[in-house]
Image (cartoon, rainbow, N blue to C red):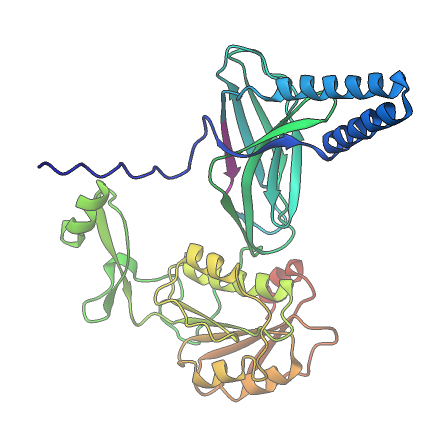
Amino acid sequence: MRSQPPPPASRPRSGTRSGTRLAGALTPLGRGTLAGAAVLYAAGFVLGYPEPVVLATGALLALAAALAWTAPKPALEVRREVTPLKVPRGEAAVAVLHVANLGRRGLSGLRAGDRVGGAEHVVDLPRLPRGAARTVSYPLPTGERGEIPVGPLVVVRADPFGLTRRVREYGPPATLLVRPRTLPLPVPPSGRAHHLEGPAGDNAPSGTATFHTLREYVVGDDLRHVHWRSSARTGTLMVRRLIDAALPTTTVVLDTLGLTEPAVDAAASVAVAAARAGFPVRVLTGDGLPPDARPDAETILDRLALVRPGTGAAGAAEVLRTARGGGSLVLVTGDPAQVGRAAGLRRRFDHVICVYAGPAPAPAPAPGVTIVPITSLDDLPPAWSTR
């Protein structure tokens, strides 16, 4: 006897055409109207007056018309895009809503509700004639750094009286990543006389060359550096990017005790400047998170977007004690006591810089430590240039 084939697996819910029904029922006003009609019927029956019965009948007819209005299932194609998905804090990000009517009748009374963070954003959609499409955009909040969930997106169709509604969910939720702000800065000095104009990059001398990352092939690249496995997987010719291991490393330590947004922005600006110049960079925080092995600018921004104020009593003290020496140390803190701890690391690093983002006045200079006081990110470039 042949066995029956298993039922097909359900497809993941990404439906932009029909949506997923969440609710289709009376609104609070509709329930109140129904309750009022019942009371009027009872009053008319008990008291023997026809007027309450007439009013109750009118209310029930209105409810019936409202149910007939919202009962048909709308044939909609709904798609929401968040652009860009990653944005610096304070810059513009929008959600673009594409709605198309695939049915044979025009649709009106549509309203879209999109949950953004902890609030719901409601958009009234214009009337959609048969076969028509509309595009509506609305801004997303980017004032706070971190991950902002966007969705689920629901489309509500209500009758003109507001007695009934039909709610359907469309598409998967999205996530907007709000990153720190950054400003261009020169690479911090290393205290060495070599390699200050830039990394040896792809032409690093043998013996000090180490693998850094993969990038797309450009004309003139050495074919010996082609990474064939990745090229076959991506369909694009990829080559190994080598860096000189002897290049000075920039170590950025962000103190998360009493964390402020200018401090996060300053740490991101320093680390991104070194990474985009091709220098090795380490980003350490006082929350105990391990550093990325070979972070690039995008990885640094993604990680610092999620940094939260620390709760440990040690703060950055333990990170400074265990940080590997060499190159430049840039400590970003709002605690004056950390400046003195950074001075004790002068022998382990070629250059020590403390970006002080705490309340004024700045702490007294410590031996071997350059103090860069700031109150906002805009103060960093001029202070950094004169350090």
Q: Is most of the magenta stretch helix, strand or loop?
A: strand
Q: Quadrant of residue 191?
A: bottom left
The x, y position of residue 12, in whole percent, is: 37, 39
Q: In this view, does 175 lie to the left or right of 119?
A: left
The x, y position of residue 233, in whole percent, is: 20, 45
Image height of 150 relative to 297, above or below: above
* Number of marks present in the image shown: 0
- Work out whether residue 45 or residue 52 is closer to the camera in this orientation and state it: 45
- From this viewpoint, is residue 197 visible? yes
Q: For the magenta stretch, what is the residue range?
A: 78-84
Image height of 280 relative to 339, above or below: above
Looking at the image, which residue is at 17% across and 54% down?
225
Image height of 109 relative to 354, above or below: above
In what quadrant of the picture does the C terminus appear?
bottom right
- Work out whether residue 137 or residue 170 is closer to the camera in this orientation and state it: 170
The x, y position of residue 305, in whole percent, is: 53, 58
| Residue 81 shown in magenta | yes
In what quadrant of the picture does the N terminus appear?
top left
Image height of 257 relative to 16, above or below: below
- Work out whether residue 60 or residue 155 is closer to the camera in this orientation and state it: 60
Task: Return the residue found at the far left.
Answer: 1
The x, y position of residue 56, in whole percent, is: 80, 21
- Work out whether residue 247 or residue 25 is closer to the camera in this orientation and state it: 25
Looking at the image, which residue is at 84% across and 26% down?
40
Q: Is residue 320 left or right of residue 27?
A: left
- From this viewpoint, is residue 367 visible? no
Q: Quadrant of residue 291?
A: bottom left
Q: In this view, does 63 lie to the left or right of 247?
A: right
